[in-house]
């Protein structure tokens, strides 16, 4: 399993490529740290964001590899979203970002 630093670096590279996010996202990795994404800027700071995704590092990787369905993760409480409507709107960009980050 990748470390927080490795995942952050992968997301940083993916965000710098062709992934276009028009809102900021904070990944709360359940006590293992944070990844804040605002456009091409990616950090491990716990800053406010338009969408907060709370998920374990293991489940984040599983979703990126398409081994865990995000809807199943939501239904089972493994994934929590601060704004479901915004998450649904951003879903294609988020999935593209996560798939490039694993």
Image (cartoon, rainbow, N blue to C red):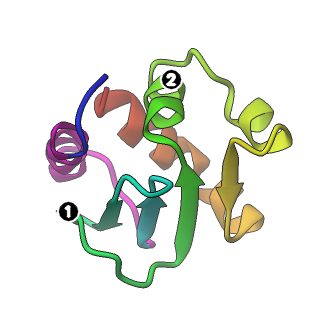
Relative to 66, is 24 above or below? below
**In the foreground, 89 or 46:** 46
- Which element is circle 1 on? loop
Residue that carries the numbered disc 2 in the rendered image: 62
Magenta span: chief secondary structure: helix
Does the stretch in magenta take in 75? Answer: no
Q: Residue 40 got which mark?
A: 1
Q: Residue at x 43, y 28 (%)?
A: 61
What stretch of residues is rendered in magenta? Answer: 5-23
**Which residue of the protein is positioned furthest toward the top in this rendering?**
67
* Residue 6 x %, y %: 17, 37
**Other residues around mark 2 within 10 Å, as few (<14) / some (14–19) / many (≥20):** some
Relative to 19, is 7 above or below? above
Q: Residue at x 55, y 70 (%)?
A: 51
* Residue 87 x %, y %: 65, 58
Left or right: 9, with 102 as reference point: left
Query: What is the quadrant of residue 36 in the picture?
Result: bottom left
User: Does the residue at mark 2 contact the one at mark 1 (Cβ under 8 Å)?
Assistant: no
- Which element is circle 2 on? helix
Query: What is the quadrant of residue 88 in the picture?
Result: bottom right
User: Of callouts 2 and 1, which one flags the residue occurring earlier in the amino acid sequence?
Assistant: 1
* Residue 75 x %, y %: 85, 40
């Amino acid at each position: 399993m990748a470390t927080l630093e490795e995942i952050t670096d992968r997301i940083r590279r993916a965000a710098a490529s062709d992934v276009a996010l028009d809102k900021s996202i904070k990944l709360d990795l359940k006590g293992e740290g944070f990844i804040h994404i605002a456009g091409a800027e990616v950090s491990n700071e716990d800053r406010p964001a338009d969408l907060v995704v709370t998920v374990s590092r293991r489940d984040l990787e599983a979703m990126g590899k398409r081994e865990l369905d995000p809807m199943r993760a939501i239904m089972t409480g493994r994934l929590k979203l601060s704004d479901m409507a915004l998450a649904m709107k951003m879903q294609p960009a988020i999935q593209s970002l996560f798939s490039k980050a694993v």
